[in-house]
């Protein structure tokens, strides 16, 4: 099995840049996902594709958990999360979500946030989450609704596609991002009491540079797109996106609604 997972598939490698592109927003989403998935005192929890630790660090804030293990295949993210950790209940390690290095029934709950859409053969990752969670435990995940729930990203891709017709927009319908697609997979894998819903946060930017600069670092699909353009096209794109961001008003704060699909299911007894 090739060593590809969230970061390799989406060009996420720089932890500091990732924090600006996504980390600051995933911390807003984490409490919503945890409350949807459920959490109890004493739980042993696995965070699959933990990235820089947004969800991992939030779990002990919601309940007095027994322990949290965060796994990710991107070593710079694992190192970044370890360096921030001061809680002895939390640990991080490098691992492939599709071949989890844990025994059956090792956890009470497994979460995965904003990761599955980037994992080749995501069904295998969900099956692994089901395997390592005890009977009557829960498997919960969220992915961005990239087609209709990320206007601040579609803005970039749609303008770029007008400027350059060769620009592809495959990211808009990544695996598991269509309505009820996660719920269908959860049921196919034998999980019970399956429910899929929408979780909404707002991404708020202080000014155009706060919005645009993270996308120029090459992280994630928007960063890959911007980096792939010729200098003249990139400059034109920047100008058009700036005008769209400003909306004929002075530069300053702007707020975008962002929606994630979330799904949970119970491991059969």
Image (tube, rainbow, N blue to C red):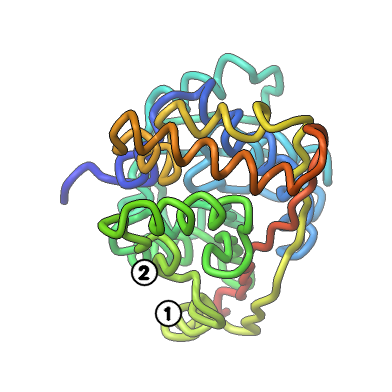
CB of mark 1 within 8 Å of CB of mark 2?
yes
Give the residue drawn at x 33%, y 65%.
124
Would residue 147 be seen by someone viewing this image from the given angle? yes
Q: Is residue 17 above or below residue 60?
A: above
Residue behind mark 2: 123
Residue 162 placed where, x, y %?
A: 41, 58
Q: Nearer the viewer, residue 37 or 181?
A: 181
* Total labels drawn: 2
Give the residue drawn at x 54%, y 44%.
240
Where residue 111 sits, quadrant-wise, is bottom right
Q: Nearer the viewer, residue 44 or 153?
A: 153
Neighbour tally class for label 1: few under 14, some 14-19, many 20 plus, Cα within 10 Å = some
Considering every residue shown, the one lying at the far front of the view is: 248
Neighbour tally class for label 2: few under 14, some 14-19, many 20 plus, Cα within 10 Å = some
Compared across the picture, whether 9 is left or right of 221 comes to left
Give the residue drawn at x 57%, y 56%.
110
Q: Of helix, strand and loop, which one carries label 2?
A: helix
Give the residue drawn at x 57%, y 60%.
144
The label nearer to you, 1 versus 2, is: 2
Q: Nearer the viewer, residue 100 or 211?
A: 211
Would residue 64 be seen by someone viewing this image from the given angle? no
Residue 68 placed where, x, y %?
A: 63, 39
3D distance between C-alphas at marks 1 and 2: 8 Å
């Amino acid at each position: 099995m090739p060593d590809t997972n969230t970061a390799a598939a989406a060009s996420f490698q720089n932890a500091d840049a990732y924090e600006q592109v996504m980390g600051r927003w995933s911390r807003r989403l984490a409490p919503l996902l945890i409350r949807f998935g459920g959490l109890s005192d004493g739980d042993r929890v696995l965070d699959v594709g933990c990235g820089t630790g947004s969800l991992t660090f939030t779990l002990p804030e919601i309940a007095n958990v027994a322990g949290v293990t965060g796994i990710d295949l991107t070593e710079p993210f694992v190192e970044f999360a370890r360096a921030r950790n001061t809680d002895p209940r939390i640990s991080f390690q490098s691992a492939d979500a599709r071949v989890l290095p844990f025994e059956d029934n090792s956890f009470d709950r497994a979460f995965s946030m904003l990761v599955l859409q980037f994992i080749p053969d995501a069904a295998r990752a969900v099956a692994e989450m089901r395997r390592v969670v005890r009977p009557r435990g829960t498997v919960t995940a969220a992915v961005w609704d990239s087609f209709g729930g990320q206007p601040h990203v579609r803005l970039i891709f749609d303008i770029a596609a007008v400027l350059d017709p060769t620009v592809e927009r495959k990211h808009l319908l990544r695996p598991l991002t269509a309505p009820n697609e996660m719920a269908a997979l959860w049921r196919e894998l034998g999980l019970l009491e399956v429910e899929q819903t929408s979780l909404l946060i707002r991404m708020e930017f202080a000014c155009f540079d706060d919005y645009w600069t993270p996308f120029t670092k090459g992280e994630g699909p928007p960063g890959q797109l911007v980096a792939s353009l010729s200098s003249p096209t990139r400059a034109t794109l920047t100008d058009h996106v700036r005008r769209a961001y400003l909306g004929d008003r002075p530069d300053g704060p702007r707020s975008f609604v962002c929606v994630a699909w979330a799904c949970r299911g119970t491991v059969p007894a």
